Image (cartoon, rainbow, N blue to C red):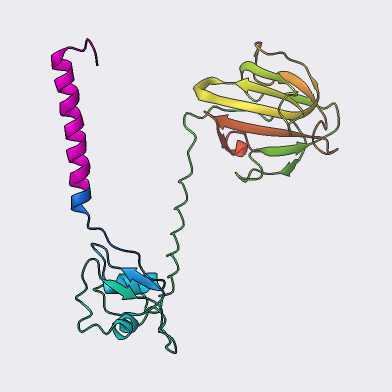
Amino acid sequence: MPGQPHWLARCRTHLISLAVCATLAACAGSPTYGPVPAGSYRVQSGDTLYGIARANNASTADLVRWNSLPDADKIEVGQVLRVVPPPGATNTPAPVASSGGSAATRPRPQAKPSKPAAKPAPAPAAPRTATNKIPMTWPATGKILANYNGSSNKGIDIGGQSGDPIYAAAAGKVVYAGNGLRGYGNLVMIQHENGYLTAYAHNRELLVKEGVSVSKGQTIARMGDTDSHGVVKLHFEVRQKGTPFNPNEFLPSR
């Protein structure tokens, strides 16, 4: 180019020479072959007769026979092999690959998966024991309709008449008074010492509010049937740090 520095022109010439050399080297590294006839295959580097046979749904015996090969293990790169039967010939279905070598072997029957061993049932958790029990009084005077079982009933149900008084089983502080807990209706919950809490459910009327302190035996509600499917009763629970315990362990004998 006019006005181009001499050193820049030399660099451009050098780069063009390198590009031409690289192209020539690439062409020299790969031999050029003519077209392959239909039904034939030209052997590539890394090919095996077994692999070629499988790729063309034939067997190694077929390829040996169709191509009159003296040795099935000796094929050369660039060699053209017939991979379809010649007129009047048939082919043998391709063998199933085996785990060792290129020899054709009969397919192994698949083993039936064994059933997984049954996991052992987890050992039942040891029942928790209430600690530092506090003495309680009966929260209602009616008869027991259902006892504690730890699963479907985590307390006891005490029957009676609508409006019967409900008593605080022990002194403490009211931490809940409302009907926002589904399945319990009008509910009172009292926090006691040693981490204990008592719950009084299905009341018709609540006589205490959250935050007030109550004494043992104080009337805190009136028995009812709210959210109890029409059965007038008190559902009474005793818990310590969230774990329910049988109220009969805390109440005096009748």
Q: Quadrant of the N terminus?
A: top left
User: Could you tell me which residue is drawn at 57 percent across and 31 percent down?
Assistant: 239
- Image coords of residue 124 (percent x, y): 47, 51
**Rendered view: 90 above or below 201:** below
Say whether residue 20 is left or right of residue 202: left
Dominant secondary structure, magenta: helix
Q: Give coordinates of residue 226: x percent, y percent.
A: 81, 30
Q: In this view, does 104 lie to the left or right of 178?
A: left
Residue range in magenta is: 1-26
Residue furthest to the front: 2
Q: Position of residue 101 (x, y in %)?
A: 23, 74
Q: What residue is drawn where x is 76% and y is 40%?
A: 143
Q: Could you say which is closer to the camera, residue 9 or residue 169?
A: 9
- Please identify the quarter of the rendering in which residue 181 is found: top right
Q: Is residue 14 magenta?
A: yes
Q: What residue do we see at 34% from left, 74% from top?
A: 53
Report whether 120 appears left or right of 195.
left
**Furthest residue toward bottom:** 88
Choose between 104 and 76: the one closer to the eye. Answer: 76
Q: Position of residue 188 (x, y in %)?
A: 70, 23
Q: Quadrant of residue 80?
A: bottom left
How many discs appear? 0
Quick one: quadrant of the C terminus? top right
x 45%, y 68%: residue: 115
Is residue 97 in sight in this rendering?
A: no
Q: Can residue 162 be seen in this view?
A: yes
On the image, which quarter does residue 225 sit in?
top right
